[in-house]
Image: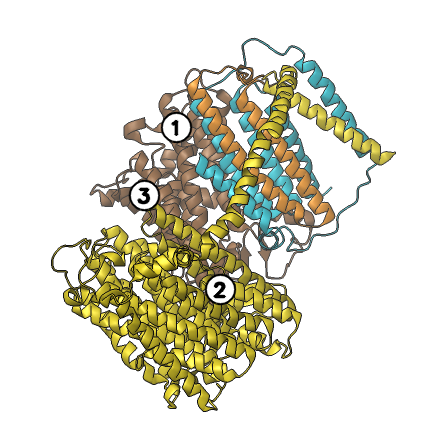
Amino acid sequence: MLIRRNPLVMLICIELMLNAVNLTLVAFSRQLNNREGQLFALMTMTVAAAEAVVGLAILVDIFRVRDLEDVDDLSELKG
Amino acid sequence: MGPATIVFWLASAVALAGGLGVVLFKEPIRNVLSLVLVMLSLAVLFLLLSAQFVFAVQVIVYAGAVMVLFLFVITLLGPVREQGTVRLPWQIFISAVVIAAFAGFLVAMLRGVSYRTPDAADPIFGSVQSIGVGLFTDYLFPFELTSILLLVAAVGC
Amino acid sequence: MIRLDTPDPFGIYSNPVGHWFVVVIAMLLLAFVLITATAYVVFFERIALGWMQRRPGPNRVGPGGFLQLAADGVKGLFKEGFAPVGVDRVLFVVAPGIAVASVLLGWAVIPVGIWGSITYWISDLNIGILLVLAVSSMNVYAIMLGGWASNNKYSLLGGMRAAAQLISYEMAMGLSLVPVFLIVGSLRLQDIVGFTVHWGPYSGPIPLLLLAPVSFLIYLVAAVAETNRAPFDLPEAEQELIGGFLTEYSGFRFFMFYLAEYLGVLTQSTLIALLFFGGWYLPLIPGAIALFIKVVLLVFIFIWLRGTLPRLRYDMLMRLGWKALLPLGIANVLVTSILVVLLS
Amino acid sequence: MQALALAILLFPAAGGIFLGVFNWRGSRLLTAMVGPGVIWAAFVCVLILLGNNVDQDFTYWTWIRAGSFEVPFDILIDHLSLFMCLVITGVGGLIVTYAVGYMEHETDGSYARFFCYMDVFVLAMLILVLAGNTVFLIVGWAGVGLSSYLLIGFYYWRRSAVIAARKAFVMNVIGDIGMILGAFVLFVSYHQVVYLKLFPALPHTPDATTELAAFLLLVGGIAKSAQLPLHTWLPDAMEGPTPVSALIHAATMVTAGVYLVARFHPLYDATIYAHAAVAIIGAVTALFAASIALVQTDIKRVLAYSTMSQIGYMFLAVGIGAYSAGLFHLLSHAFFKALLFMAAGNVIHALHDDQDMRHYGGLWHDMRRSSVTFLAGSLSLAGIIPFVGFFSKENVLGEAFSRGDGLGYAVWFIGFVTAVLTGFYTGRMWWFAFWRPASEERPVAGHLHEAPLVMLVPVAVLAVLTTVGGFLQIKAIGGWALVDDFLKPVLGEERIRTNGLEYLATVLTLVLAALAFAAAYNFWIRGTWSPAGWRARYGWGARVLERKYYFDELYDWAFVRPLDRLAGFTDREDRSLIDTGAVDVGAYTERGAGALSLTQTGFLRSYVLVFVAGVVIAAVLVLWRASS
């Protein structure tokens, strides 16, 4: 995410990170033998799904409005 | 080395390879497919961790729905290659330093950790019943919050 | 796992190597049976469509055209695997493989039944049905990647249609099964098949169709949409998209897609038979034959639909999924849960 | 029976929902059927319950549960609540039926809205009286306040109506707060909200807690019943349509305070000061309101002040422990005051909404039927035998007199003076508005149209009840006492008359009231005495009365002005002190932001980098702290 400039790929990277978190959550839940880890993994998935949907919707809208080459083009909001 | 161990090493290897693919491929569609690979191998790992329900949800929600959405958007938008001027020349170097620091931190943290084999899971562990009871009793409030979040996402788009 | 309830005479089963040997043999056997059966689903369809449309159907190769499928298979295998210019080679080749694999994987948890003393299934997960749903939803990757990799506008459109269609119907499909889970109280397919009631003098298994008729209807529609069959065959849509994602495929790869589609029909028929028709229970008839009869009848329903209904327009398809089936499914879940709570 | 008890509430609720939600633009006929119909249906339910002699606390389900605080949804059916339900649904039904004719000039939407509000009002009132616990009582109490607000402000395009509605609401909310605090005190002290469990838990000797609870509940009661000093909303509430005035003033809302004291009689019996306060407030209000009524010229305002005065009698009665006498007066007042309002409504309707008595006159000739019924109501209000008002008022005063202590004689004397004043202002209203020759200022020239049948029949029914209703309880002439007997299971035995002095007092009251009624004739018809002359001689008195003892001005001076000044002061200080500070803060922030904005490159990736670097630093710090 630090070096990729395609906004779509950045979203994908976020999903990857969330997955990594899920893996640790489930692994610790097994290690400690309690179910909370799995429950929170499920919640993470829910949040990730919502985040992906919203992010993609925003992305599609941006692409509709303008021809975007990379995420650095989106810097109008700078101070 | 039992079959479970073989499966574990295989799935971990595939997951790592997929992760690298996500970061390194240049075409977005390859990134997405690598991520699907990661997710599926993670699902296998979940199964090994006797988290059966999480496994099913991982496959259905992530691999089945979210990633299809990504694929859909990619096909909708067409190939977007990274090109154009580089505006942050120092970004890569600084990133490398930060990542190295983080990796060092991880190594430092994990050095002293001792591992143990977890207790045998009871048959109910990770099943739909156990998850359901947890969600609807102790964690009802976060559950409702996430459902509201989903509703907002569904209505807002 | 395969479980043999009879004693283990040669000690094969208790030996780890022998155990795996048996498992592999059984898996291969299952794959062989499935692929052969699929071939005869295709044959059955051609015959049935022939009857419905007042034409002979296959009748040249073999007695009554019985070997037509073998001939087709041989022909497909030996044709040149042609790929157009500019395709993404890797994805183009991988896509048909995903199609077949996604359908075959589902059989890991489908219990085919209790035949005499042998209880046969591969894996006895307590989330059984969810696995089938999960794996069969992988099918969309095959279609989307096939459409994307073909470097053809029609194929791409077909792939995108498939994605949208899948997401629309996946929801209704999952929701339609929730009442079944509520009634049975388990997600294991074995428990669902073996669900018994005690109504007055009657005590025994009951087809869940009687308890959850709305679920059955929704599931049937969603299953047809999930297998991309008429009237929901928009990803292919020969008349508008000249074959959709299949346009550029030929030879063995086309054959794989073809196999996947009919294997999907077989899978869904078996699932419906297990979920809603009591699986291998039928009075007076041995389990295997009972299941066989039910599956054949359900396969016939699939064929019948194809022979009868015209293809839906795309917006109608979407409206049906989101505005009819989904609310109906939610209402069904609500009503059923209220009834389950009230009657228990 | 359990379902039937609930049906009393469900009928008006269903009617309100139907009219409010579905029949908003629907058929006018349906509105006219449903609006009164549901109230009559509730009336029938009450009658059936009465016929089966039900006396039970029906608990339906647990409504609220929080720790030891548990509120059931229960309906208490006993003779007191049935009595109140009879009044509410019976008289209320007549009034709503009358409104079918009175509101005929409204547009369809307003028509349905009106009946929707009316049904909701009756529903809230029924909840109030049927409630089996204090929490549920508060629900009904607040519901009555809300629906009266809606009804007073029914003509929401009239500024004065909106102001009056707001005033009523604010006054009622003051009462509600007292009421809620009272319920809190009771719960905190006795850990009960259900009446039937609460009352046995109360102590029999007075203590500070019960006094406090009783006083707080009384605050609610006087606000709702328009007693001193929270009375100012009632005359203004005349801005609502006349059936609303009839409903609020006669049958229901204002009697809630009386019901409250009667319902909580075990509490009041256990107190000394709070109980006496009830009687004193009632007596003083009675005199106070009657004196203001002497000079009012708006017919509905005269009736409004007379209502306050009569409610004062009821408070007087329950304050001295004569609960069933108070409730009998409540019943009687429901009859004759609803009658007066509706007969007056006929007149107002015929005169195109003119309410000024100075523009009336000649009604005896033009509207004979309405006039006859109004006369019955007036005589009853003045306390002339044999109308119901005589028996009930005599009952109250008799109980006060026979109490035989200082408080009893004091309130009796005030009540006696009030009775004479009542006779006079009633006579003034009657002679001046109805008997006198037609005024030149009458807004409708020529012959007046008598009201339609749907308005006359309820009036006639009430006129009959007013005439013969007194025979329910003829203690004044030594006869039976049906109301006392009926309410005995709840309220206990009433005192028996002991000496002949009481009968003498009764006769004195009757004679003087009748003379006062007749004296009014001399003022306004024969002109033996001239009102103008008296006004010239006692101008200051008339002014005080016309300004209603300057209560509105007092409140204005005591509460509104200081608050206004405080608001003006804070406004000025806000501008000079805080605004300047805010502007300065803003300026500094702007400058600082200008400097900081250099870090806002707009590049998402650099933000991510900073974020990740921060995480790494934080993690390293945590690890370092943990290891050292």
To the question of a shared chain for discs 1 and 2, the answer is no
Reading the image, the residue beneath label 1 is C245
Above or below, D530 against C245 in this view is below
Work out which quarter of the rendered image holds the C terminus of chain D and state it.
top right
Above or below, D16 against C227 in this view is below
Q: Colour of chain C?
A: brown
Reading the image, the residue beneath label 2 is D222
Q: Do tag 1 and tag 2 residues touch (Cβ < 8 Å)?
A: no
Residue D447: quarter of image: bottom left
Residue positioned most to the right:
D628
Nearest to viewer (mark 1 / mark 2): 2
Reading the image, the residue beneath label 3 is C45
What label sits on residue D174 in the rendered view? Answer: none
Depth check: C158 or D315 in front?
A: D315
Task: Label 3: state its secondary structure.
Answer: helix
Tell me which amino acid carries mark 3: Glu
Above or below, B133 against D131 in this view is above
Report x, y in % for residue C176. Answer: 42, 51
Query: Which residue is rendered at x = 69% and y = 18% of the image?
Result: B95
- Spot the yellow chain and give its letter: D
Report x, y in % for residue C326. Answer: 39, 46
Tell me which amino acid carries mark 1: Phe
